[in-house]
Image (spheres, rainbow, N blue to C red):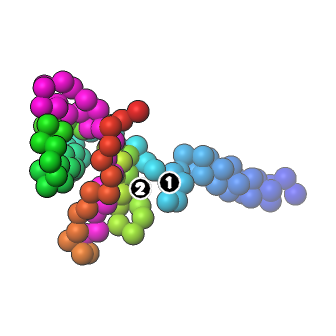
Amino acid sequence: MASRLAPVLLLVLCAIASSATASIVGGRTEIKNVKSNKMVQSLGKFAVEEYDKGVKGGSNAAALVSFSSVISAESQVVAGTKYYLKIAAEDSHHARKLFDAEVVIKPWLKSKQLLSFKPAH
């Protein structure tokens, strides 16, 4: 009897171990090594450029920012891939500021869109 339960117990333990380390479906996943990740840094620069385009369309040119780097990032699989970026940038007075940005990429549509760009809390 014990020899027949061993394989079942082994399968249950494997399932528990793998589910403990797996990411949640639809949940956010931290992106490691963002400083050296060229794609993530490119997305950060894109977010700042898109934000600046919106500012230039308005009357507050002093609100323009200059991209420095992405300092942390997470991704989430949605209808495409959504990136949550913490971006370091400089304002027009060369003061370093942090911003939270959300960018979604839909490769099958060749689409990249800035959803949100705001000062970090």
| Of the pair 7 and 113, the residue shown nearer to us | 113
- Residue 72 on image: x %, y %: 32, 37
Q: In the rendered view, tell whether residue 1 sits above or below residue 70.
A: below
Identify the main secondary structure in magenta. strand
Which residue is tagged 2? 76
Query: Closer to the N terminus: mark 1 or mark 2?
Result: 1
The magenta span reads 87-107
Q: In the rendered view, tell whether residue 111 sits above or below residue 25.
A: below
x 35%, y 61%: residue: 81
| Of the pair 6 and 50, the residue shown nearer to us | 50
User: Quick one: which residue is furthest to the front in this view?
Assistant: 59
- Structural crowding at the residue carrying mark 2, measured as other residues with C-alpha within 10 Å and reported as few (<14), some (14–19) or many (≥20): some
Query: Is residue 6 found left or right of 63 in the rendered image?
Result: right
Q: Please check the rendered image and state whether residue 81 is part of the magenta-colored stretch, yes or no.
A: no
Query: Is residue 6 found left or right of 119 in the rendered image?
Result: right
Say which amino acid is labelled 1: Gly
| Of the pair 13 and 80, the residue shown nearer to us | 80
Q: Please check the rendered image and state whether residue 98 is part of the magenta-colored stretch, yes or no.
A: yes
Query: Is residue 64 found left or right of 19 in the rendered image?
Result: left
- Residue 88 on image: x %, y %: 24, 33
- Structural crowding at the residue carrying mark 1, measured as other residues with C-alpha within 10 Å and reported as few (<14), some (14–19) or many (≥20): few
Q: Helix or strand or loop: what does disc 2 sit on?
A: strand
- Label of residue 27 in the image: 1
